[in-house]
Amino acid sequence: MTTSASPGPQGAIDAPLVARTVSVDVSELDALGSLLDLLPPDHPVSWLRRGEGLVGWGCAAQVRTAGPARFSDAAKWWEETTARSVVRDEVEEPGTGLVCFGTFAFADEPGDSVLQVPSVVVGRRGDRAWMTVVGRGSLENLEPRLSPAVAPDAPAGITFADGALNSEEWMSAVADAVSRIGGADLEKVVLARDLVATADEDVDVRWPLQRLAAAYPMCWTFHVDGMFGATPEMLVRRERGLVTSRVLAGTIRRTGDDERDLALAATLARSSKDLEEHEYAVRSVADALEPHCSSMNVPEAPFVLHLPNVMHLATDVAGVVHDAQTVSSLDLAAALHPSAAVGGTPTPEATALITEIERMDRGRYAGPVGWMDASGDGEWGIALRSGTVDGPSVRLFAGCGIVADSDPEAELAEAQAKFVPVRDSLAT
Ligand SMILES: C=C(O[C@@H]1C=C(C(=O)O)C=C[C@H]1O)C(=O)O
């Protein structure tokens, strides 16, 4: 575990964090554009849906963790950091006061995860808006002030290439997985592939973020430490004792023809292959949440979630937690990860097969990404429809749940459709 922080003008690196949250007039915020328009290029973070949520920038403190203890090490650091901090919060909503943003590796090894505390966070929820400034030293030195940022440039000269496996190789991996499912204890495994986009110059992540938020308003547009995307899947949200999770599994591509898409949605809702795959995913989430809840609601049948590129079978699981004092939203995310939506069923067999046949490091793709406040409330999505930006290069990821009667060609087409959000977001 490594920690670092910018000492700022007023304090030593190990001095406690000080934070001040003030209310912001929504009309003042609107006059500056969307929340994303406020983001400067310095450590931008985002968690936005339908124009609401959180953006932040600068880095007041951070911790990097790795390995099987990546979640618990980060959670411990957050607990210690918030316990030492001095906070003046004039708003007191979930997401005010000290807030951290995190992105966690999918796998135990090699693993590379981070929790960051931005020096400025701006939040919006309905008709309430706020701004938090974080530093070290004296609260009185913190001056919350909003201003628009210089707009990002479009990425230039983007070209795409196969990542670890080309299409043919990936289809053989899928066929291999199907044959293994027939035999052993394995019911479902999620296989992913990657593409690599290369630009002429460093990619400014604020560009794809703006495009994703505009094209996928019903998804959570996120960015933390190079990991960005627009995910439709909420691993866990905890707010004032209520926990919810949006489980997706079972996918069909959209055709662009609304009438045909409605017919396809009806087919999806009746498809026994997809319903079975969905059932595994819901069960894995409900089982992991159950020990933390005094009551739960797990709908019996899924609904169809319509996105611009694909449609999914979706179930919203909800519960009342009894251990909010001792178990944070990040602890819940750790307990849920990897759900059957991104790992498979049973988890140990599925993750072992992923390591064996996927032939790439997922990095933080399909890991939890999101934010948490000092009370432990927060939102952790699954980093899907996502990419990792590193200088001029962006690695895009997409995966599909493979079950006994999966067809490799259909799965390849589904993966292509799942690349669309990030691929299009890099266009000029
Ligand atoms: C793995 C991904 O998506 C997951 C797999 C799905 C499926 O196989 O039907 C659907 C939604 C997600 O839970 C991805 O987008 O990369």
Image (spheres, rainbow, N blue to C red):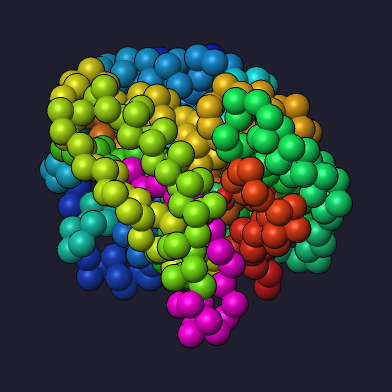
User: Is 401 within the magenta?
Assistant: no
User: Is 156 left, or right, of 383 in this rendering?
Assistant: right
User: Is 19 left, or right, of 266 in this rendering?
Assistant: left
Q: For the C terminus, which image quadrant?
A: bottom right
Between 135 and 398, which is closer to the camera in this rendering? 398
Q: Residue furthest front?
A: 183
Q: Position of residue 258 (x, y in %)?
A: 49, 83
Q: Is residue 41 above or below residue 260?
A: above
User: Is 256 left, or right, of 62 in this rendering?
Assistant: right
Q: Residue at x 81, y 66 (%)?
A: 157
State whether residue 411 appears in this view. Answer: yes
Q: Position of residue 246 (x, y in %)?
A: 36, 48
Q: Residue at x 45, y 15 (%)?
A: 73
State whether residue 365 appears in this view. Answer: no
Between 416 and 369, which is closer to the camera in this rendering? 416
Give the magenta part as a residue range.
245-263
Q: Residue at x 39, y 41 (%)?
A: 282
Q: Position of residue 193 (x, y in %)?
A: 72, 46
Q: Is residue 101 above or below residue 211?
A: above
Q: Position of residue 312 (x, y in %)?
A: 47, 59
